[in-house]
Image (cartoon, helix red, strand yellow):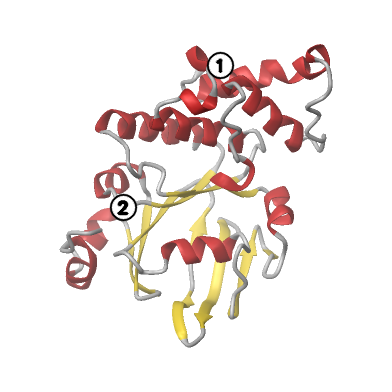
Amino acid sequence: MSDTILETAGLTKEFRGFVAVDDVSLRVQKGSIHALIGPNGAGKTTCFNLLTHFLVPTRGTIRFKGQDITGSKPAAIARLGLVRSFQISAVFPHLSVLENVRLALQRARGASFDFWRSESVLSVYDERARELLEDVGLTDYEQALAVELPYGRKRALEIATTLALDPEMLLLDEPTAGMTHEDVDRIVALIRRVRQGRTILMVEHNLSVVEGLCDKITVLTRGRVLAEGDYATVSANPEVIAAYLGSTDG
C-alpha cells in the first residue's frame, strides 16, 4: 500500500525459548501518530528495538518505505529516515543546549564531531539549531547546560537533537514517562507541532496522551497483537479491558 510507511510481517523475537515478540504484523500509515500500548512485559520496547535493529529478529520482515530493512544496521536505518529518539540524542550533559543541537546537526550533515574547531567555524549551524530549539520550546534555555535542565525540558532537548536528522519517521519510547502534568502537556504539544510532515510511532503508558494524540493504536499482550484501531475501538474491546485497561501497573 502506497500510504504505508512502515510494515512488519511475522516479526518474532525469542530469547532462549521465551518469545518476547510473537508473530507481530504491524502497518503504520504515513503521516499518522500510531501508538503501541500494553501491560508491562507486553513486548513494546522489544518491538522498537527490532524495528531499529538494536535487536536481531528471530524471524519476520521489516519494510520501510517499501524497502526491506530487516538486518540493516541502526545507522543505515537512521539515514533512511527512521529514527528512534535516543539514536542521535546521546545528550552531552556538560555542553549547552545549543551546543548539543549543533553537534547533532553536524552529524546529520555527515560532519565529524569537531570539538577542536573554532567557534566561528561551528557557528554555521547556529541558525538551524535555534530554529529547532524554538520548535521544542527551549529558546530561553540555549545557554543552559543540559545537565541543569528539568526532566521534561531534557526530553524536549532529546527530541530536538533527533529532529536535527530531519527524520521522516520518529519512534518515541514513552516520551512522557516520569513527567509532571505540566511537562506531559508540554511534550504532547511538542509532538503535535513536530508531526507536520512526519510519521510517529510511540510507546506510551499514559492513556490520556494516547487518546488525545494517536490516530491508531496497536495493543500488545504477551508479545502478540491483541487488538488494533482508534482509541474508541480498542478501549471498548473486552479483551483489552481485561489485559490492559484494567491493570494498575500499565
Q: Secondary structure at mark 2?
A: loop
- Which numbered disc, 2 or 1, marks the residue that appears first in the sequence? 1
Q: Quadrant of the N terminus?
A: bottom right
| Residue holding disc 2 | 205
Whether residue 1 can be seen here: no
- Measured as percent of width and height from the top left, residue 90 is found at 60, 40
Q: Are marks 2 and 1 in contact (CB under 8 Å)?
A: no
**223 versus 202 height, above or below:** below
Residue 7 higher or lower than 123, as above or below: below
Query: How many residues crowd mark 1 within 10 Å: few (<14), some (14–19), many (20+)?
Result: some
Residue at 62% from the left image edge and 24% from the top image edge: 95
Q: CA distance from mark 2 to mark 1?
A: 30 Å
Amino acid type shown at disc 2 = His
- The residue sitting at 33% across, 61% down in the picture is 229
Closest to the observer, 249 or 125:
249
Q: Secondary structure at mark 1?
A: loop
Q: Is residue 24 left or right of residue 111?
A: left
Front-lying residue, 122 or 132: 122
Residue 109 at x, y percent in the picture: 78, 34
Q: Which residue is mark 1?
A: 142
Residue name at image x 40 percent, y 27 percent:
150
Give the number of the mark in front: 2 or 1: 1
User: Dividing the picture into quarters, in which one does residue 222 lie?
Assistant: bottom left
Report whether 192 appears left or right of 110.
left
Measured as percent of width and height from the top left, residue 98 is found at: 61, 20
